[in-house]
Amino acid sequence: MTDPRPISMDSPHDRKEASFIGRRGRFRTVGKIGNIEVARVLDGHLLGETAQGFFPEFDREALKPHVHWLCPTHYDDESGRIPMPVHSWLIRLGDKNILIDTCLGNDKIRPDKSEMHLLNTRYLERMAGFGLGPDDIDYVLCTHLHVDHVGWNTKLENGRWVPTFPNARYVLSRTEYEAAKIQAAQPDCLPWIRNVFEDSVRPIVEAGRAVLVDGTHGLLDELTLRPSPGHSPGHMCIELRSQEGLAFFVGDLLHTPIQVPLWSWSTRYCWNQQMAAESRREIFEQCAAENALLLPTHFETPYVGRIREANETFSIDFGW
């Protein structure tokens, strides 16, 4: 396979797409960042893990002061379970429709991952509820390339994996892409991890829809893709800045509100736990300083919040 090269954001194909944007359906908003409309598209729920199993640094005494506000929505104190919904964020930015992360996907073979194996969810139907179909998406931004963030990159069509969003540019971190490609090629790579690359990443590249970016990268004036490594080598957060608001779409920078006050706790799935904690702290500090909205991928209702900083720790005010 030939490695992908950067694709111009202003290609003739993109200009052609702009000609039919006016004929698209409504965009039913869930929230707003300034004057920019945002919606949440649910794919499903993972079974969730216990906090004790999820966090290598788990400390019941450290968690105890936060149980009263975490329960029952974000934590179950009896079982220790952490709820884990999986959703995308959908942005209407001018005449462009932008999808951030693509969840689990249907028909994907995930050995030893029964909750992700051969799914048949209503993700595209839920997207249609916002007046948008796959052809209407202009950009797919991947915060990273883990199994629950790239599944709907592709769909199964006549036995082949093809881009679900055929008119979209899929924007990936080059660092993340190279790391995922190397991992998938290792002889001891777990089959389900290799499958993620082969069915949800490689087909995007081979279809010529991938845009690989390095470092901090601006897009469409209002968006900035910022490296936030740690959970994975090339993890990115996406900054959305309008004249009236600021927000960060943070992927798996954190998985649960537990990691707001206990920001140093990284998960056992993090590639570099210390680096993940440092990236998390940096984003929290900026969110607190600028009253930015934080939009993670795995929070239960109300899904978002604003970070506050006091006494060398952080808290969250839930809601838009």
Image (cartoon, rainbow, N blue to C red):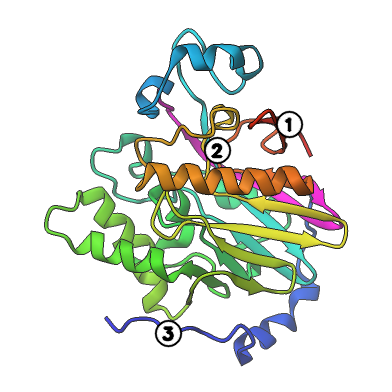
Q: Is residue 280 visible?
A: yes
The x and y percentages for residue 79 are 44, 11
* Residue for point 29% across, 49% down: 109
The x and y percentages for residue 51 are 43, 22
- Residue range highlighted in magenta: 30-50
Judged by depth in the image, the label closer to the viewer, 1 or 2, is 1
Residue with the mark numbered 1: 318
Judge from the rendering whether residue 257 lies leftward or rightward of residue 264; answer left or right: right
Residue with the mark numbered 3: 5
> Is residue 151 on the magenta stretch?
no
The x and y percentages for residue 15 are 69, 87
Residue with the mark numbered 2: 298
| Mark 1: secondary structure | strand
Q: Amino acid at mark 2?
A: His
Distance between mark 2 and mark 3 Cα atoms:
32 Å
Q: Quadrant of residue 3?
A: bottom left
Q: Nearer the viewer, residue 155 or 294?
A: 294
User: Which quadrant of the figure contains the C terminus?
Assistant: top right
Q: Label 3 crowding class (10 Å Cα cut-off): few <14, some 14-19, many 20+? A: few
Q: Quadrant of residue 151?
A: bottom left
Tally the marks. 3
* Residue for point 78% across, 57% down: 27
Distance between mark 1 and mark 2 Cα atoms:
14 Å
